[in-house]
Image (spheres, helix red, strand yellow):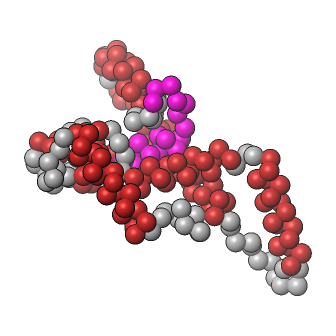
Amino acid sequence: MRDDGGTPAKSLLKPLQKVQNQCLRRVTGAYRRTPIAAMEKEAAIPPIQLHIETTALQRAAKTASNRVEKESAEALNGIWNTLVKRRQKTKRLLVPLEALRERAKDRENEIQGFLAHQKDCVEWEAAINPRKRGQRNAGRAQAERRHRTGGHQHQRRATTFIAKWADLEWRRRWQVKAKDHTETTWKTP
């Protein structure tokens, strides 16, 4: 991650992407002309940039409630307030980890809103057509098992909102890349 908590520069990601692509080609047995996004989807491995961002956001969210982190933030605020007494009220710039925490909160709020909307849509549809409710419940159990763990993650690992956000983001990126392609490779759900 960058000093300001943003995503890493493309020049830093390029070597990692190159190694990941070479490994994906070997693992999947894909030809050189096979699109990278298709190999990632087939191998259930997210793009390296999304993986790095997800890992950083999960770490920031996990350490947010750490006692030492809270004490450090309080100490920084105290120092800032004593140095800036003469000036008008100005807010202290965020440390990179604090910026990451803010982004993690935003991502968690985004996915919570999406999941609430999805639930409302299912309930609305069930109210309109009660016959399909039994059919949906059978398919829903299977879908919940598949999405409970954050899609591409290990089944034993607890699901976080960040992991769910990463799966949704990966799905969005896949749909954007596969939008106008008609080849069989791009028709993977």
* Above or below for 156 versus 46: above
Task: Name the residue located 60 percent from the left edge and 48 percent from the top edge.
Answer: 59
In the image, farthest residue toward the left: 183
* Above or below for 88 versus 189: below
Whole-percent x, y for residue 21 in the image = 29, 52
Q: Nearer the viewer, residue 152 or 116?
A: 152
* Above or below for 135 versus 118: above
> In this rendering, would 76 be left or right of 41?
right
Whether residue 123 is visible: no
Whether residue 20 is visible: yes
Task: Name the residue located 56 percent from the left edge and 51 percent from the top edge.
Answer: 57
Magenta residue check for 155: yes
Whole-percent x, y for residue 40 in the image = 29, 45
* Above or below for 143 versus 1: above
Task: Name the residue located 11 percent from the left edge and 42 percent from the top edge.
Answer: 184
Magenta residue check for 149: no
In the image, farthest residue toward the bottom: 86
Task: Name the residue located 49 percent from the left edge and 49 percent from the top edge.
Answer: 54
Whole-percent x, y for residue 105 in the image = 60, 51
Q: Quadrant of the C terminus?
A: top left
Q: Nearer the viewer, residue 174 or 137?
A: 174
State the image quarter where residue 41 is shown: top left
Q: Nearer the viewer, residue 179 or 64?
A: 64
Whole-percent x, y for residue 183 in the image = 10, 47
Chain part drawn in magenta:
154-170
> In this rendering, would 90 be left or right of 126?
right
Marks counted in the figure total 0
Q: Nearer the viewer, residue 10 or 174?
A: 10
